[in-house]
Image: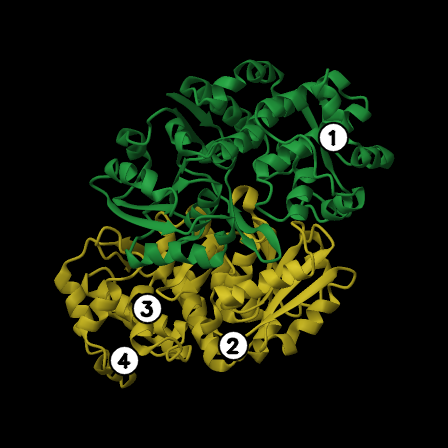
Chain colours: A yellow, B green
């Protein structure tokens, strides 16, 4: 087991990473203040892992709250089920909310913990690779509004995060790949050495080698923790974590949520960010192609949808949350392992990036 | 105009107090970062003060969100109207939410500001005496849940509070008295000199003398700011602000919300806390009677409902939010101007307090 400390002053917390952690009661106990615990999970995860977690919570007054699965339920009506469960069980402000599941469960349980009686303790047990390396670090919680994703929420830090790498065994391979997109992202934005390691170890990760997974998750969380520690409320450098996300969100929105997984859209979107960084002369074509090959080796798409026009990209990107006073800021690579957030680029470079024939480029690469 | 600074480290903010502040644009401007402002108010307040506020916001991109009036609407459905208004007007994370109204508007607008895009700027303009001296200081925001009051919310501090004492001219006299209950409370819990001042100046306050009101509000807010500054998240001394509230909540719940105003229930509840402190030998009978006379001079009830039995009080008090691990903690007076929170009292003293014939006591006092 590895332990990583997220340093946020009085809101600091540990992340435990390793195989078979779910049954280890002694990891949870120090982070539960009272005798009340509420486990929030969903219909898919509950049959797989709820019983094992409840066994490590013997002796506590536990209420289990099982929500419907999926992003479509990340709304107020479902959040209300958490409050109903807490109040129905008469949990007071010393209760501890535990999120057992992927990003949607973590976001909703975290937001419920932030709001219930104006804030109670919170522990994250993320069960997907994406939530393990992304949403479990950084304190972003929230729900969707009919007019926008994640529009209502809170910055709220957990008492601890417990990442059991064994839970990835039940994860569909496509979702494992989607999580790897974010892992690769950390290498690209701030850890060039990690890119070397990933090139060597991608097969081990995809075959669920527990040691390789532990290392990759720890290094990803450490990268995110460094960035978040420097900029908890996203005033500056934290935005580099969105490499590939502005292009990627345009793909997700255009295709309809759920058609492309978030990580898949981020992979194709990051290829576009690599292309643009290359056109700006910041990284070489060899660097760009190296990035493309890494995403391919993780089983991810590296070509945006053929039917999307440059105009459609621009339209979706104009409503991005990173637009401030009308300026579209993009996350680009100054070099491999160093991202910048900038609105200072020639407009024609963006246009050329959107017009690039990615399919042809990748075909060329495959036949080299 | 008086300016009071609430000292909460990086979350510090000023409270401006005085007559005719609503039209003074230069007080608001330094606390609005971007060009977007959302004014949240209700159907009662909007016709009285919205136009004057909007005149001081000329030049900003302003959206007005007018909610239905009353505690019955302090729920998610009404909160959603604020998010709808913000998203409909495409306000981004640099918007500033201004609450114009009483405690319900302040609680809901503040909670919306805490959650919208995970937190935007917030300014309070409380228009009732109760919200001016109580809910506008301390950062408590939230909504009710069908199973409990204020069960969902956040601690969220405003950028500034603007208290226009002229707005009390349109406040019904019964609500002015209810606000005075909280003003008297500050004297009882932490400011014995203020009690002397209140005994002299109660007639001036009830006739809306602007100088007296400014002084009383400033002194009340200063008292609350001191207590909140020492204990922002209610780990200890902040609970003394609930003098009379545990008995008072029992009255409110038993009678049905809205039958007794909150301040009226607090007045009668505080008389019970005075009685219990007297029975414990901590304050004299003369002190107790002095407190009773002060509430009477403010036009407040000093006798709990005749039909409420000791058993009914105990039943309602057992579900109080201050119950921790089954112990009922009460706020009592160690002496006039010094409150303590304690669960360490003989049970028979509480029982005797609940059995006291307050009507007879007050009749005696009236005929002295």
Residue on which the image places disc 2: A204
Q: Quadrant of the C terminus of chain B?
A: top right
Q: Chain of mark 1?
A: B
Residue on which the image places disc 1: B359
Looking at the rendered image, the disc whose residue lies closer to the viewer, 2 or 4, is 4
Q: Measure the C-alpha gap from mark 2 to mark 1.
A: 81 Å
Which tag, 2 or 4, sits closer to the chain's start?
2
Q: Tag on residue A249?
A: 3
Same chain under badges 2 and 1? The reply is: no
Can I make out residue A181 in this image? yes
Q: Measure the C-alpha gap from mark 4 to mark 1.
A: 79 Å
Which tag, 3 or 4, sits closer to the chain's start?
3
SS of the residue at dot 4?
Answer: loop
Q: Residues within 10 Å of mark 2 (few under 14, many from 20)?
A: some
Q: Tag on residue B3?
A: none
Looking at this view, name the residue that lies furthest to the left. Answer: A348
SS of the residue at dot 3?
Answer: helix
Residue on which the image places disc 4: A305
Provide residue B345's location: percent of width, then percent of height: 82, 33
Q: Quadrant of the N terminus of chain B?
A: top left
């Amino acid at each position: 087991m590895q332990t990583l400390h997220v340093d946020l002053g009085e809101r600091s917390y540990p992340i435990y990473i390793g195989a078979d952690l779910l049954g280890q009661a002694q990891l949870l106990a120090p982070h539960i203040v009272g005798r009340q615990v509420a486990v929030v999970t969903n219909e898919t995860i509950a049959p797989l892992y709820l019983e094992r977690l409840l066994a490590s919570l013997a002796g506590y007054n536990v209420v289990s709250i099982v929500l419907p699965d999926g992003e479509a339920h990340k709304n107020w009506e479902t959040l209300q089920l958490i409050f109903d469960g807490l109040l129905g069980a008469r949990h007071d402000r010393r209760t501890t909310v535990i999120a057992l599941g992927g990003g949607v469960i973590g976001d909703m349980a975290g937001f419920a913990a932030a709001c219930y009686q104006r804030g109670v303790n919170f522990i994250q047990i993320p069960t997907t690779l994406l939530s393990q390396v992304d949403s479990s670090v950084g304190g972003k919680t929230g729900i969707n509004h009919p007019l926008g994703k994640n529009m209502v929420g809170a910055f709220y830090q957990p008492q601890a995060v417990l990442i059991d790498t064994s839970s990835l065994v039940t994860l569909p391979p496509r979702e494992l790949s989607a999580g790897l997109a974010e892992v690769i992202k950390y290498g690209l934005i701030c850890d060039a050495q990690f890119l070397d390691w990933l090139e060597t170890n991608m097969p081990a990760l995809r075959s669920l080698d527990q040691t390789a997974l532990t290392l990759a998750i720890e290094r990803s969380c450490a990268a995110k923790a460094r960035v978040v520690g420097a900029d908890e409320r996203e005033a500056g450098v934290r935005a580099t974590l969105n490499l590939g996300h502005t292009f990627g969100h345009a793909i997700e929105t255009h295709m309809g949520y759920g058609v492309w997984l978030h990580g898949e859209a981020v992979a194709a979107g990051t290829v576009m960010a690599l292309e643009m960084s290359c056109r700006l002369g910041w990284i070489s074509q060899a660097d760009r192609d190296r990035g493309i090959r890494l995403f391919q080796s993780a089983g991810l798409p590296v070509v945006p949808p053929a039917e999307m026009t440059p105009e459609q990209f621009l339209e979706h990107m104009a409503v991005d949350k990173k637009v401030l006073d009308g300026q579209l800021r993009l996350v680009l690579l100054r070099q491999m392992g160093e991202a910048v957030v900038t609105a200072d680029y020639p407009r024609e470079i963006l246009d050329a990036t959107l017009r690039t024939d990615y399919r042809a480029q990748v075909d060329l690469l495959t036949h080299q």
